[in-house]
Image (cartoon, rainbow, N blue to C red):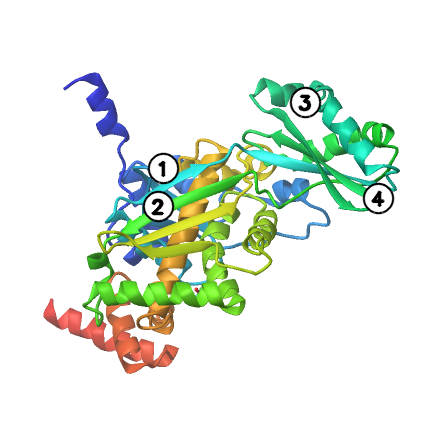
């Protein structure tokens, strides 16, 4: 076998880890080592607070009095641009990780997710008030743009050395005497908030002098619409058939009706988009990114036509398949901030094999398209409560002391009886444990 082939076999990892949800956290970590997603010491370090301590926290924010934990899980079955990926997710809401993994498996049947992205542009805004002549100001700024961009780049040597830098200067008129100057900066693997905020402050006096205006705010915009990510997936109709819903084309049609509902009604579109952000935010939180910035940008983008609309679209493809698209601004970072100071974030980026900020945006968006699909499929078939209650039953069973396969057995009986009381779980556990003992 050639060296190349050996190398490929060595690095090929599967994101499909069957039975993972039935394991204990400890055995799941072992499984990640066995399947070569994590080194043994990395897996071990995930336990507990994952190396995050009070000193890290105190260096991060103000007035620290302790630490605040969240569950960290991994979403399985993701194939993104033909590569298997595991997606770390930190989130408090049950069923999001299961939903993402389930939908990613359906999408894998059509080849997974195709992801592409814009250059990582973050935009600074400088507000100029009381501008005496808008026409003269616009002319001078457009004429001097190359020089202004060169000046901007002169103060960003390190970013320019990494291949980034100021790319374009844009002038927008807000009213009869107010202008806003946008400076579009390629910030590479940084989200670039500090960089462009500093740049806006430095450029503002010069912009005011050139236009005769008075400087107002100097700050980035979180409507990062030059930093969009695009995800596409295809699900064969046959993959949509499920227990109680044998006809995959009927499930597909019900999903298409759910999409129409979101397109016609902003009240529904908001909830539809919440389902998208369930996946996006969980990945961003695990990877230590500014999810508030992404949320703000996503919702503004959803409303860009003047009407709030769904961020995803689901359509029927030529062979009857379900085709899903997601387009949204997604400003991410893999350097600085938490990526530098939080050991759990460093591990999450490594586990997800994140190679750049745009790559992170791509996998977070794939997670968003997946959680949206899972929600639409559940809502247009059995409803989401059945799945939620099944997960709840597993938790009650585990809390009652069930372990291994008994978790599923007890949970199934609780769900069948629609009784989720701990005392009933303990009774069932005693019966089932006794029965297993007898059989043995
Ligand atoms: C719940 O976290 C998300 C959903 O409401 C999304 C949706 O309705 O599409 C299920």
Which residue occupies 55% across, 51% down? 298
3D distance between C-alphas at marks 1 and 3:
36 Å
Asked if residue 11 can be seen in this view, the reply is yes
Task: Tell me where residue 195 sits by quadrant.
Answer: top right
- Find ligand 1 in the image and state its quadrant: bottom left
Look at discs 4 and 2 and give the one toward the viewer: 4
In the image, which disc is placed on residue 38?
Answer: 1
The response on whether ligand 1 sits within 8 Å of label 2 is no
Q: Could you tell me residue 233's position as x and y percent? A: 33, 48
Look at discs 1 and 3 and give the one toward the viewer: 3
Q: Could you say which is closer to the camera, residue 277 or residue 413?
A: 277
In the image, which disc is placed on residue 177?
Answer: 4
Q: Could you tell me residue 179's position as x and y percent? A: 78, 40
3D distance between C-alphas at marks 2 and 3:
42 Å
Is 125 situated above or below 263? above
3D distance between C-alphas at marks 4 and 2:
60 Å
Asked if residue 402 can be seen in this view, the reply is no
In the image, which disc is placed on residue 29?
Answer: 2
| SS for dot 1 | loop
| SS for dot 4 | loop
Look at discs 3 and 4 and give the one toward the viewer: 4
Task: Tell me where residue 435 sits by quadrant.
Answer: bottom left
Dots 1, 4 in contact, CB < 8 A: no
Mark 2 or mark 3: name the one nearer the start of the chain: 2
Dots 2, 3 in contact, CB < 8 A: no
Dots 1, 2 in contact, CB < 8 A: yes
3D distance between C-alphas at marks 1 and 2:
8 Å
């Amino acid at each position: 076998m050639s060296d190349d082939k050996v190398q490929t076999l060595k690095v090929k990892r599967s994101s499909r880890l069957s039975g993972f949800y039935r394991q204990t956290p400890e055995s799941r970590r072992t499984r990640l080592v066995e399947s070569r997603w994590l080194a043994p010491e990395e897996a071990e370090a995930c336990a507990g607070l994952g190396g995050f301590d009070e000193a890290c926290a105190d260096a991060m924010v103000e007035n620290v009095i302790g630490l605040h934990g969240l569950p960290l899980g991994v979403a399985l079955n993701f194939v993104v641009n033909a590569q298997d990926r595991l997606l770390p997710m930190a989130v408090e809401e049950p069923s999001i990780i299961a939903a993402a993994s389930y939908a990613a498996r359906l999408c894998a049947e059509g080849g997974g997710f195709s992801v592409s992205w814009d250059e990582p542009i973050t935009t600074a805004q400088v507000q100029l008030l009381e501008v005496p002549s808008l026409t003269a100001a616009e002319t001078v700024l457009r004429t001097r743009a190359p020089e202004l961009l060169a000046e901007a780049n002169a103060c960003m040597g390190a970013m320019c050395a990494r291949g980034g830098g100021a790319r374009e200067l844009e002038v927008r008129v807000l009213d009869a005497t107010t202008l806003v100057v946008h400076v579009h900066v390629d910030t590479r693997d940084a989200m670039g908030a500090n960089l462009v905020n500093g740049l806006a402050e430095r450029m503002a006096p010069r912009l005011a002098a050139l236009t005769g205006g008075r400087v107002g705010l100097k700050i980035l915009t979180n409507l990062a619409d030059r930093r969009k990510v695009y995800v596409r997936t295809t699900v064969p109709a046959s993959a949509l058939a499920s227990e109680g819903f044998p006809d995959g084309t009927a499930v597909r049609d019900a999903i298409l009706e759910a999409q129409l509902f979101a397109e016609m009604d902003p009240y529904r579109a908001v909830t539809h988009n919440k389902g998208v952000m369930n996946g996006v935010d969980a990945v961003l939180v695990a990877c230590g990114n500014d999810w508030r910035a992404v949320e703000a940008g996503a919702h503004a983008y959803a409303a860009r036509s003047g009407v709030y609309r769904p961020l995803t679209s689901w359509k029927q493809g030529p062979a009857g398949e379900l085709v899903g698209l997601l387009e949204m601004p997604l400003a991410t970072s893999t350097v600085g901030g938490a990526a530098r100071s939080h050991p759990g974030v460093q591990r999450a980026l490594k586990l997800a094999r994140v190679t750049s900020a745009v790559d992170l945006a791509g996998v977070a968006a794939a997670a968003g398209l997946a959680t949206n699909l899972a929600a639409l499929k559940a809502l247009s078939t059995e409803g989401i409560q059945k799945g939620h209650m099944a997960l709840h039953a597993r938790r009650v069973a585990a809390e009652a002391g069930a372990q291994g396969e008994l978790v599923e057995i007890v949970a199934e009986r609780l769900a069948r009886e629609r009784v989720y009381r701990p005392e009933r779980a303990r009774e069932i556990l005693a019966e089932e444990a006794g029965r297993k003992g007898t059989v043995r």
